[in-house]
Amino acid sequence: FIQAWYREIAPLSNLAPEDATRRAEDLCKRIRVPTLWELAPTPLLLTVMAHVHSSKNELPETRAKVYAEMVDILLSRWDQVRLSEIAPMSKLLAEVGRDPESLRRTLSKLAFELRARRQNRARTKDAKQDLADIPKLDLLDGLKELTPGKKDYNWAVRALETIEERAGLIAPDTLGSDVFTFPHPSFQEYLAGVHLADDD
């Protein structure tokens, strides 16, 4: 996979074939760190790690730093302009005096709350809902917290439209669904941990 990845991106990145080969070998070596090797069999995580390595020309050695880079990449995907009628996320955040870090903190808090609900549900043995899922109303409430006075529901709807139209850190589980998910449960776990660190 890594060799194929670098073969494909070499022409797009103006990489000489020998440089692409060298970078592929470097990434193969870096992912053999035990904490990262555990992530490599998951296609999505391996793809995002390859993206981190090819864009930064390195891959951090700790899992937490790799997840931080992956979250940054997935958050930035909401700003890739595909549909001109929907404002990119950075423009929406600027409207309410916020930045991508504010959005990351909001999603971290939401991930933490979902983990807490899952633990409570496990104690009551009520498993009717997969608590890795994010109900649309919960997401709108979280986004609304970013607005002045925490009251602008219309802004939250516009932000959610941007999220729905672009792949990123969270996405609808199916087209038109009222349920959103993280691309992998480990992202929820990482963000929940980040929320605890943010609160310290």
Image: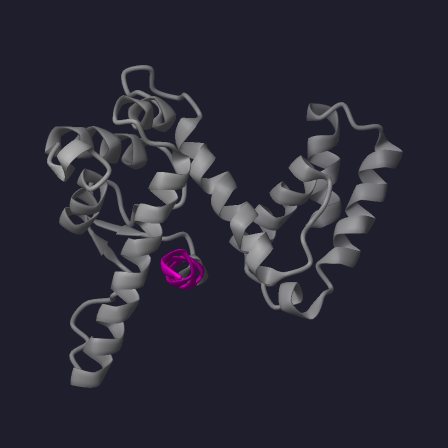
Region in magenta = 188-200
Residue projecting furthest to the right? 18
In the image, is 101 to the left or to the right of 160? Answer: right
Residue drawn at x 76%, y 23% as measured from the top left = 14
Q: Position of residue 33 (x, y in %)?
A: 72, 65
Q: Is residue 93 above or below residue 57?
A: above
The part of the image, by quadrant, that contains residue 115 is bottom left
Q: Residue furthest top?
A: 84
What is the residue that sits farthest to the front in this orientation?
200
Q: Position of residue 94 (x, y in %)?
A: 33, 23
The residue sitting at 74% across, 25% down in the picture is 11
Picture coordinates of residue 10, whole percent (x, y): 75, 30
On screen, residue 68 versus residue 131, left or right, reads: right
**Residue at (31%, 36%) from the top-left corner?**
163
Q: Is residue 199 magenta?
A: yes
Q: Residue at x 22, y 69 (%)?
A: 117
Q: Is residue 49 left or right of residue 146?
A: right
Identify the image quadrant of residue 30.
bottom right
Colouring rule applied to residues? one colour
21 inside magenta stretch: no
Side of 10 where 150 appears, left or right = left
